[in-house]
Image: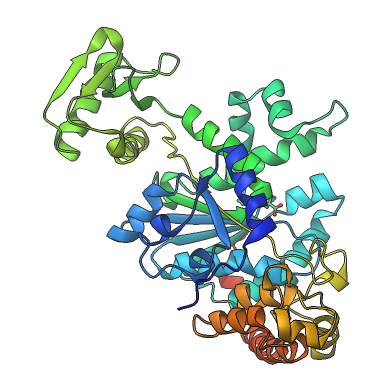
Amino acid sequence: MVKLDPWGSAQIEDYARLRDEFGIEPVDESTWSRIPDAHPLFRRGVVFGARGLGPVARALERHEPFGVMTGLMPSGKMHLGHKTVIDQVVWYQDHGADAHIAIADFEAYATRNFTIEEARRLGLEEYVLTYLALGLDPKKSEVYYQTKRSRVKDLAYALGLNVNLSQMKAIYGFEDQVKMAHMNAPLMQAGDILHIQNPDLGGPRPTVVPVGVDQDPHIRLTRDLAQASRVFNVTETQDQKIGVFVKPEKPRQPVTRLLDEAERVLRRELGFSDLARKDNYRAIYIRSATTADIPRIDLAFAQLESKSLGEPGYFPPASTYHRFMTGLTGGKMSSSKPETAIFITDDPKEVERKIKRAKTGGKATEEEQRRTGADPTVCSVYETYLYHLADDKLLPIVYEECTTGKRLCGGCKLQALDLLQAKLKEIREKREASRHLVKEIVRND
Ligand code: TRP
Ligand code: SF4
């Protein structure tokens, strides 16, 4: 078997450094081998990092409820890079998740100078139809507009109580000239992510937000805001015990009553018997628990807070981060630069032109390439195979033939083009066949 390391060298180092600098957890074999039938984007290292994914993996393994939430800013045409997110959402949906997608029309308005109407129109025509074509199922999934869902707006407003200006500056580097609407966009996004844990949408449960790594600041903010919503803090103490604490600033009810409830959950629901309750510390210590138990204890408490205490009880959402596809011309892939991306609705001639011009990892001459092989890790065509076109049989063949010089770029592009045209044709046909489902999947609240 070929050892597949399609993103060797510089690229991987960059993402790895980014991951370490920001304290993002790696997603590697030890993660995805826990996930039954993991999506190729996981297995191929396209999804390279995550935060708090453990509880989601656990829910997947045990067929317990979990949710997936993401959003897309409708800032232009939908391209292959955007497809990566929806492929993941569809996979989660097909593996038991309820899926929620925000059309970030408010964000486009607040940060990109779009009118709400234009953002909504693009959202529907460019994005939602393609989501349906890619397999989003109205029975398990919903799409909504940020500007229409008042619960999200209310929540965004309320979440503002738990973050101040200096924190926002530290996270986003906002300058004094920043517009208030822009500054509100991260709170709106936190509202998007957390509101799916409201009781009518399934209550506190593991949720996952698949996004590009540029979204990590929003995720950190949102995880902090979830934590801030909580009454109980489940944590490892200095002397390495696991403790459940009532947060000092929180109780709207007598601490004794809260600890009674906590004790009941620990004994009856979680089956711990060796508890040491210390009312004056507002704490219960669990002698036999270990750090590995923290997420499941924390989840039980989030649910207690929501069900019995009338609190939000948000369980910290997980995130995953995928690599960005590089542009066909070598730089960034961008909706505003048509030459850099294949748009889902490009006509076949355009697709052909773009692939033929695409930057590869090929050598200057055929002779040299035959002799030394080419470099798929810097090739935008190989990336297209990796993200969208090649199954598990084809991908290692392309890689091997490319690196050993058996494969030349001209023929390789023709094969990619064939696969891509077929895929895009299928998507375009499904888009048209899905028009009647738009009403079902797009909610008006
Ligand atoms: N900010 C995201 C983007 O630029 C869009 C977005 C809005 C989002 N709400 C979200 C992403 C909630 C994930 C979860 O594309
Ligand atoms: Fe890219 Fe194919 Fe050329 Fe290899 S042979 S560099 S994968 S186009």
Q: Would residue 22 be found to the left or right of residue 25 on screen? A: right
Residue at the extreme left: 273
Find residue 83 and report its image quarter: bottom right
- Please state if 206 lies on the left or on the right of 331 as rendered: left
Is residue 158 or residue 416 the one in the foreground? 416
Q: Position of residue 294 (x, y in %)?
A: 32, 35
Q: Which residue lies furthest to the front in this view?
A: 371
- Above-or-below relation of 294 to 134: above
Q: In this view, does 76 lie to the left or right of 213?
A: right
Judging from the image, the colouring scheme is: rainbow
Q: Is residue 140 visible?
A: no
Position above or below: 189 against 237: below
Q: What is the quadrant of residue 292 in the picture?
A: top left
Report the front residue among 37 and 45.
Answer: 45
Q: Position of residue 169 (x, y in %)?
A: 74, 27
Which residue is nearer to you in this view: 207 or 47? Answer: 47
Residue at 61% x, 55% y is 211
Work out which quarter of the rendered image holds the C terminus and state it: bottom right
* Quarter the N terminus occupies: bottom left
Q: Which residue is drawn at 69% across and 92% down?
A: 418
Q: Where is residue 310 in the image (x, y as percent from the top left)?
A: 38, 32
Instruction: Say which residue appears at 12% left-offset and 26% top-offset.
Output: 274
What is the residue that sits farthest to the top in this orientation? 280
Where residue 247 sits: x, y (%)? 40, 18
Tally the marks.
0
The answer to whether residue 74 of the structure is visible from this angle is yes
Residue 309 drawn above or below residue 200? above
